[in-house]
Amino acid sequence: MAYATRGATASQAPSEAGTQSASSDAAPNSSSTSSMPTSSSSATLDSQTLLSSIQSTLAHSLAPLTQRLDQLEQQLQSPRNTNSRDADTDAEDSGATQQLQHELEGGNPPPVESVFSAAARRSDNLATNEHEFKVVSSWFSSVRAEHIRLILRNEFEPTDIVKLVHGLGKKERKKDNMVTLNEASGALELANSSTTEDEYAMYTFFQAWEVYRGIFIWGAPFHLRGSLAAALSVYTSILFKLIRSYSWPGARSYHFSFHQQRVTNPTTAYNPDIWRKVDTDLVSEHCLTTAHSFPPSQQYLSRSRLFQRPSQPRFHPYSASSETGNGRPTTGPLEARIRFPFRNNSGSVRRFGLCDAFNSRPDGCTQGENCRYSHACNSCGKFGHGAFQCTAPHSRR
């Protein structure tokens, strides 16, 4: 329409100019001027028709694109309609993304409760993963496969720990050889101690415990395995301290009760803080009240004697009967200040602290009881005779 109007205006301008010029000339030219508006109006109609046809063609071609743009505009302006399940999924994804970003930026790790609540599911997934299970089985090839699966799922009975070492896990205990809890004393008693005492001996238990905790760590979340391994080492040290302070049966009862709590409550199974701390209630319940169900082995007693304090005081190299009278070193000669214990199996001729005059000849020493050296044989170390009278086989007399 705009182009048609402009054309009409342009065509009218020359006609008006021509009309004015024609009127000033002569009257016979009036017929020619009257015919020009007719031709310009026909040209205007043709332009309008052409423009309208072009406009309709463009509108028809662009109609699908216009509709699509309107739909996109409505979708952007309208609020998102999501159900509760999608909202929960988005919340979990956003929470996991925020947690990962927080950890990468050096933030705090996730809460302990959230980590250990999913520990059972993660260990179950590990047990079903054949590749991971084959790796654990190759490391502990002497343990039966079902025992490994139970340990990874934290479902292994604590009192069955001897199955991990006895007969390489292929020999089952008799049903009558079970461990029972004495409700009166709180002690663990063996139904048939003559056959199962060795199963729960201290050496056998700790041998099986090392195998158990090695498998148990594999079932923990990956980022907790290092701290859990250290916590289990601290727990083993706690058991040894309980053995020294109380008794092996008491420490064993403490362990079975403590371990059973970890199996019953999966949220604390892989918590390093739980394993590395002493449960004082269990110590009072088991270690202080548990009597010796059976005496420790003679081998353990013989080894323990090596660490007993000697009944006699240790020999001090400085003589307490020196000139100072207080056992401190003096400024005298070395052999006068240092005295060594006498040994009967030595073949040395010269011994520090022994009187040379007494060993050289009869009545060789004139000091008698006032002599600062010992009157003993410097060949065999015995008192009562000198080296010139010694009859020992190694004597050089």
Image (tube, rainbow, N blue to C red):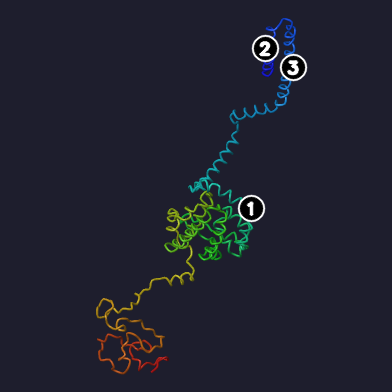
Q: What residue sits right under mark 3 in the picture?
A: 46
Question: Which residue: 59% across, 59% down?
Answer: 175
Q: CA distance from mark 3 to mark 1?
A: 82 Å
Residue 266, percent from left and from top: 54, 49
First in sequence: mark 2 vs mark 3:
2
Disc 2 element: helix
Disc 1 element: loop
Question: Could you tell whether 365 is left or right of 13 in the image?
Answer: left
**Numbered label attached to residue 17:** 2
Near-viewer residue (212 or 356): 356
Question: Which residue: 26% across, 76% down?
Answer: 326
* Residue count near mark 2 (Cα–Cα under 10 Å), binned few <14, some 14–19, many ≥20: few
Q: CA distance from mark 2 to mark 3?
A: 24 Å
Q: Quadrant of the C terminus?
A: bottom left
Compared with 196, 127 (above or below) is: above
Near-viewer residue (24 or 306): 24
Residue 70, percent from left and from top: 65, 26
> What's the residue type where badge 2 is placed?
Ala
Q: What residue sits right under mark 1 in the picture?
A: 129
First in sequence: mark 1 vs mark 2:
2
Question: Could you tell whether 278 is left or right of 70 in the image?
Answer: left
Q: CA distance from mark 1 to mark 2?
A: 99 Å
Residue 8, percent from left and from top: 69, 15
Question: Which residue: 58% across, 29% down?
Answer: 79
> What's the residue type where badge 3 is placed?
Asp
Compared with 111, 214 (above or below) is: below
